[in-house]
Image: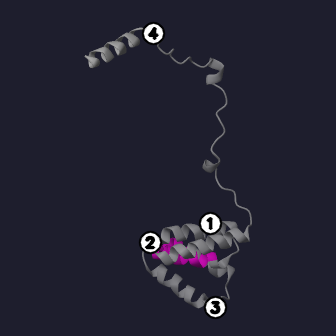
Amino acid sequence: MIVARVFLMLVFSWATLPAQKPADPPKEAPKEAQHAEPAEEDAAALPKEYEFNPIQAQTEINTGRFYFKRGSYKAAAGRFLEATKWNPQLADAYRLLGEAREKLKEPKAAREAYTKYLELAPDAKDAKDIRKRIASLKDSKS
C-alpha cells in the first residue's frame, strides 16, 4: 500500500513538471567569421631557433651522457645533436654524438660526427683513436 502511494506521488509530481523545450541547434557562424584568419599556431610546432648558449649545450651533454650510460643511445644521440646546435664549436659533443651513432649502427652519421670532432680538435689526446675509428667505419658498408 505504501509503495503504491509513493509511486502515485512520483507519477503525479512528474506529470505536473513544466515541459522542457528541446535545445536549439547551434547557429552557424557568419560567413565573414568562417574565412577569418586562423588562430595562432602552437609554439611547440614551430621550428626551434638556436643561439649560442654554452650552458644549455653542457646541460644537453650531461643529459646525453646519462642516457648513454643507461643504454638509450637514440635519446643520447638526440641530446648530443642538440648540444652541437647550442654550441657548434663544442668538440666533445661531436665525439659523443659519433659514439652514440656507432652504437646505433649508423656508420655514416658516426663518421660525419667524428670528422667534425677532428676539425674542431685536431690535437686532441684521442685524435689517433678517432682516426682509427673513422677508418674502420669506412671499411664497413653503408
Provide residue 73's location: percent of width, then percent of height. Answer: 49, 72
Crowding at mark 3 (Cα within 10 Å: few <14, some 14-19, many 20+): few
Q: Quadrant of the N terminus?
A: top left
Residue 111 falls in image quadrant: bottom right
**Residue 31 picture location, percent across and down:** 62, 18
Q: Which residues are magenta?
A: 93-112
Mark in the foreground, 4 or 1 = 4
Please state which amino acid type lies under the numbered disc 3: Lys
Q: Is residue 9 left or right of residue 104?
A: left
As drawn, 131 above or below 33: below
Reply above or below: 68 against 131: above
Earlier along the polypeptide chain: callout 4 or callout 1?
4
Q: Nearer the viewer, mark 3 or mark 4?
A: 4
Distance of label 1 from label 3 (alpha carbons): 24 Å
Residue assigned mark 2 = 142
Number of callouts? 4
Measured from the top left, where is residue 82 in percent x and y?
62, 66
Q: Which mark is residue 19?
A: 4
Q: Which residue appears at 61% of the width and 88% of the height?
A: 127
Whether residue 71 sits left or right of residue 81 in the image: it is left
Q: Earlier in the sequence, mark 1 or mark 2?
A: 1
- Element on which disc 3 rests: loop
Q: How is the image coloured?
A: one colour
| Residue that mark 3 sits on | 125
